[in-house]
Amino acid sequence: GLAEARSTVMSMSLDKITSADSASGQTTVDPKGYLTSLSSTKIASAADVGDVNKARLLLKSVRDTNPKHAPGWIAAARVEEAAGKTAQARKLIMEGCEVCPDSEDVWLESARLHSQDQAKTILAAAARRMPNAVK
């Protein structure tokens, strides 16, 4: 599972580091750089893909049964974003803005997911919709 994949990634990274320094006979590991590279490494194992699909199904059910529940839209968009599907995340959160037009959080999430120029337009629409919003 995930532990095996992490172990494989770690041993591959360590092998790469040691082979690069084998000429000098010394091995140096930059712990911060190594941890940063580990956190940026995506492991798309079957379990991870299955978890994303389960989350998608669950959140679709939440949106279908309670479409006015803003956190369901936000969570669905974040699952898509985490899965690397930014366009789908943007599409979902814009749909959330239409279904939950009085939710400041949905509008703010939409602005976060879009480019700066698009975010300005989104926030302007939110301000027109909710002139007394505090966020």
Image (spheres, rainbow, N blue to C red):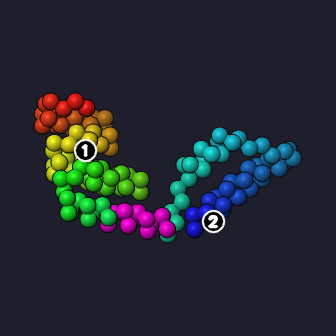
Q: What residue type is labelled 1?
A: Val
Quarter occupied by residue 6: bottom right
Q: In this view, does 127 lie above or below 3?
A: above
Structural distance between the alpha carbons of marks 1 and 2: 38 Å
The crowding category of the residue bearing disc 1, from other C-alpha atoms within 10 Å (few below 14, some 14 to 19, many at least 20), is many
Residue at point 32%, 66% (across, down): 57
The residue indicated by pointer 2 is: 4
Element under disc 2: helix
In reply to whether residue 58 is colored magenta, the answer given is no
Is residue 121 shown to the viewer in this render? no
The residue indicated by pointer 1 is: 106
Residue at point 52%, 66% (across, down): 45
Q: Where is residue 21 in the image (x, y as percent from the top left)?
A: 79, 47
The crowding category of the residue bearing disc 2, from other C-alpha atoms within 10 Å (few below 14, some 14 to 19, many at least 20), is few
In reply to whether residue 56 is colored magenta, the answer given is yes
Is 50 or 132 nearer to us in this picture?
132
Q: Which amino acid does label 2 sit on?
A: Glu
Q: Is residue 66 left or right of residue 77?
A: left
Marks 1 and 2: CB-CB under 8 Å? no
**Residues in magenta, as a range:** 47-57
Q: Where is residue 12 in the image (x, y as percent from the top left)?
A: 69, 58
Element under disc 1: helix
Principal secondary structure, stretch drawn in magenta: helix
Residue at point 66%, 61% (across, down): 7
